[in-house]
Image (cartoon, helix red, strand yellow):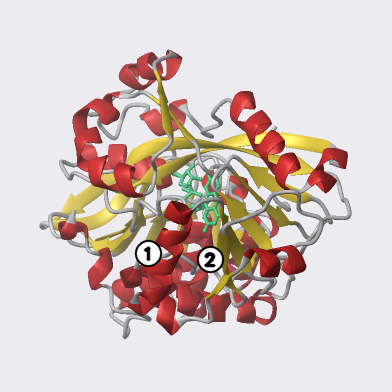
Amino acid sequence: MAPVIRPVQTALDPPAQTSVVVIGGGIVGLSTALTLAERGISVVVLEKGHLAGEQSSRNLGWVRKTGRHIADLPLSVESDRLWAEMPERVGADVGYRKAGIMYVARSEAEMAKHETWIGSDGGRALDSRLLSADEIDRQVPGGAERWFGGIHTPSDGRAEPTLASSAIAAAAIAKGAVIVEQCAVRRLVTSAGRVSGVMTERGEIRCEHVLLAGGIWSRRFLGNHGVDLPTLPLVASVLRTAAMEGPTETAVGAADFSFRKRLDGGYTITQRGALFAPLMLDHLLIGHRYLPVLKAEWKNVRLAFGRDFLRDLSMSRRWKGDARSPMEHVRTMDPPVNDGLNAEAMTNLCRAWPVFKQAEIRQSWAGMIDVTPDSNPVISPVAKLPGLTLASGFSGHGFGTAPAAGQLAADLITGDTPIVDPKPYRLDRL
Ligand SMILES: Cc1cc2nc3c(=O)[nH]c(=O)nc-3n(C[C@H](O)[C@H](O)[C@H](O)COP(=O)(O)OP(=O)(O)OC[C@H]3O[C@@H](n4cnc5c(N)ncnc54)[C@H](O)[C@@H]3O)c2cc1C
């Protein structure tokens, strides 16, 4: 069963007109809406299912800089600042804790990756440092494995996915944003060569700008307008434990498991080293563009041919505004949990920190991630469709950067000085 976010009172009906329409009520779309509303700009968020129903409620809650691509670091650093300011900004505790992130390595080869990163401009700019096996034992007591070493970034942290999006949404509404659930956007409306509105399942909304923050759906949505956004779907499965005495507040990742402390006292656990790819047409069409990143990062992707292939094929790739769109067929993408991967995560974790043998598993779920060929998101105007800005392809690490990503998207829309250099996020780089 998927996590349920804290409820938010949203609007029943969309207005006929606004300045900005945001497509997608995930954390990125909501963060953009909050920023725009704070600037006094009228904004409407349209969500086909329920708020944060897809990736934004299902993620692990890591707020991470460690190991990031150098080009993506400024956004992460700005996000840390915005997470720290969040309680005051939204008037709620969203579970942000600067409790650090640690990766532990079993072999020299695994450790070499951390050494390379810490020696890079990115690693040098942060408070990250390499750890010896003894230091790991001291910082995360009760371990039963002898690690080769590790890396630790004390300024990394975590936040609660089930609290963050709803608090951001509620704050945006309080500042004037309108948020409507169960309202899919079918397509863009254009006039005089630029975007002038959206056609939703409940009629047209006129606007000056549109932000597409549709997660895994952005590729299909844009494809219908003749724009190619290369993202591939990957599925990660997750477990949640009941409250328990654990070894540390720091989030810890090894090659084949990860765990992080939750605000409710439990732990969120996953098989960090393996992702599941339900084979779809896009894997065949654009999969070759991922070979370099597969080699470097996503080594353990388990591809499987099954029902998803046929379901995906049965969904239109071209449709008009007066017909039901694929977004109305799948209100919430809720992929099946891979119990095998979750069991592997628990076995590996219990071997490393036996205290987890006492863990009571309370919940499991899966989420589908939108991955770009270079693992960085696209936060960019779309040249072919003036008036449209895109914020998608967060590649499994967009929860942590969402506050700054949302602000960057808002800056691009309003023409304000961008919070960070937007160049690394341009669509045309792909
Ligand atoms: C299992 C898992 C673990 C993860 N762990 C982490 C982590 O620890 N740290 C981290 O930083 N990131 C993590 N991520 C990634 C992170 O969750 C995402 O990058 C982030 O939530 C993306 O937010 P989003 O708003 O772009 O997308 P989403 O949350 O997917 O939201 C997009 C929304 O758009 C809606 N939508 C799409 N098309 C339309 C349309 N046409 N009309 C109306 N609505 C539409 C969808 O219904 C959806 O709700 C993880 C992801 C998963 C699945």
Instruction: Name which quarter of the figure residue 210 lies in.
Output: bottom left
Q: For residue 376, which quarter of the picture?
A: bottom left
Q: Earlier in the sequence, mark 1 or mark 2?
A: 1
Asked if residue 67 is positioned above or below residue 198 in the image, the reply reads below
- Quadrant housing residue 172: bottom right
Choose between 254 and 304: the one closer to the eye. Answer: 254
Q: Residue at x 43, y 36 (%)?
A: 300
Q: Amino acid at mark 1?
A: Val
Q: Is mark 2 within 8 Å of ligand 1?
A: yes
Helix, strand or loop at label 2? It is loop
| Residue 181 image offset from top left, x and y in percent | 56, 45
Left or right relative to 197: residue 140? right
**Residue 342 placed where, x, y %?**
65, 32
- Can you say whether 274 is above or below 422 in the image? above
Please state which of residues 340 and 94 is positioned toward the viewer in this rendering: 340
**Residue beneath the point at 19% across and 42% down:** 225
Mark 1 element type? strand
Q: Which residue is pictured at 32% across the width and 42% down the height?
A: 294
| Picture disc at residue 20 | 1
| x, y percent for residue 361 | 80, 36
Q: Is residue 182 above or below residue 423?
A: above
The answer to whether residue 337 is seen in the rendering is: no
Circles 1 and 2: CB atoms closer than 8 Å: no
Q: Nearer the viewer, residue 315 or 125?
A: 125
Q: Nearer the viewer, mark 1 or mark 2?
A: 2
Image side of residue 380 versus residue 405, left or right: left
Above or below — where is 164 with respect to 342?
Answer: below
* Amino acid type at mark 2: Arg
Residue at mark 2: 64
Which quadrant, please, contains the N terminus?
Answer: top right
